Structures are given as C-alpha cells and as structure tokens.
Amino acid sequence: TDPNSTLGYRFDDKPGHDNIAARFLQEYRTVVIEDRAAVTTFANELATSNTLVIRIRSLAAGRTTAEFKLDGAPAALEAAFAGCPLTPLAPPPETKKKKRAAKA
C-alpha cells in the first residue's frame, strides 16, 4: 500500500467515491480494493453504467484521470464473480448475555 496515493472513481454522472481504501501494486499498474462492501458498491454501479472515471492522486506523481467506456459489464461481472458471489457479509451472530441472579 502506498500511503502517498489515493483512489477515487465515479460512474456516469453519479456522485463519486473518493479516498477508497486501495493498494497500488506492480509498479503502480494494478489497484486492488479489498474491502468487500466497497467492491460490492463498485460492481453494482459498474453493472448499470456506461462510463467509468478513475482518479488517482499521488504526492510523487501528481494527479491522473482516466475515462473508460463500459460495454458488456453485466456479463463480465457475472463471469468474474461466478465462483465468489458479491453478497454482503452477514453480521456476526449476537451472543446472549448471561443473566446474573440478583442477590437479596
């Protein structure tokens, strides 16, 4: 992870997402979003959009913006996540607290 770089993105004219927790790998050519909720949000918006705009801000390299035209995203997402569905994680089960007997 490079603490000197930040990732942001938006789809079409929808509100953007800034400062996404991401890791920059392979000489800054690959970006990984590891948070499951953030990946789910990204994929859900990707499935219904026509354009993706990526913004990377870096102290060392300045700002970079790239625009991608999206075509066939739903089919690509279905294939990519076939073995690992994008369902939100279930909250941990609540533990029952033991009731203490009141002392008389």
Image: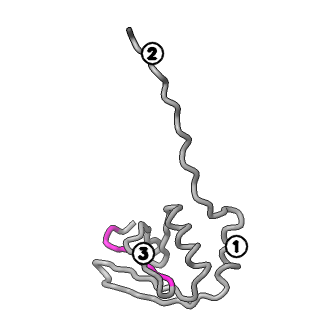
Answer left or right for 34 relative to 81: left
Under circle 2, the secondary element is loop
Q: Is residue 101 magenta?
A: no
Toward which corner of the image does residue 1 lie, by quadrant? bottom left
Q: Amino acid at mark 2?
A: Ala
Q: Give the main secondary structure of the magenta stretch.
A: strand
Badge 1: few (under 14), some or many (20 or more) residues near its Cα, within 10 Å?
some
Whether residue 76 is situated above or below residue 64 in the rendered picture: above
Under circle 3, the secondary element is strand
Q: CA distance from mark 3 to mark 1?
A: 23 Å
Q: Earlier in the sequence, mark 2 or mark 1?
A: 1
> Which of pointers 3 and 1 indicates the residue nearer the eye?
3
The C terminus is located in which quarter? top left
The label number, if any, that marks residue 78 in the structure image: 1
Q: Position of residue 67 (x, y in %)?
A: 48, 90
Boundaries of the magenta span: 3-11
Whether residue 22 is situated above or below residue 51 in the rendered picture: above
Q: Nearer the viewer, residue 32 or 92?
A: 92
Q: How is the image coloured?
A: one colour
Which residue, given by chain and number where applicable, does mark 2 sit on? 101
Badge 3: few (under 14), some or many (20 or more) residues near its Cα, within 10 Å?
some
Q: CA distance from mark 2 to mark 1?
A: 54 Å
Under circle 1, the secondary element is helix
Q: Is there a contact, CB below 8 Å, between mark 3 and mark 1?
A: no
The label number, if any, that marks residue 17 in the structure image: 3
Q: Position of residue 20 (x, y in %)?
A: 41, 70
Q: CA distance from mark 2 to mark 3?
A: 51 Å
Q: Amino acid at mark 3?
A: His
Q: Amino acid at mark 1?
A: Glu
Badge 2: few (under 14), some or many (20 or more) residues near its Cα, within 10 Å?
few
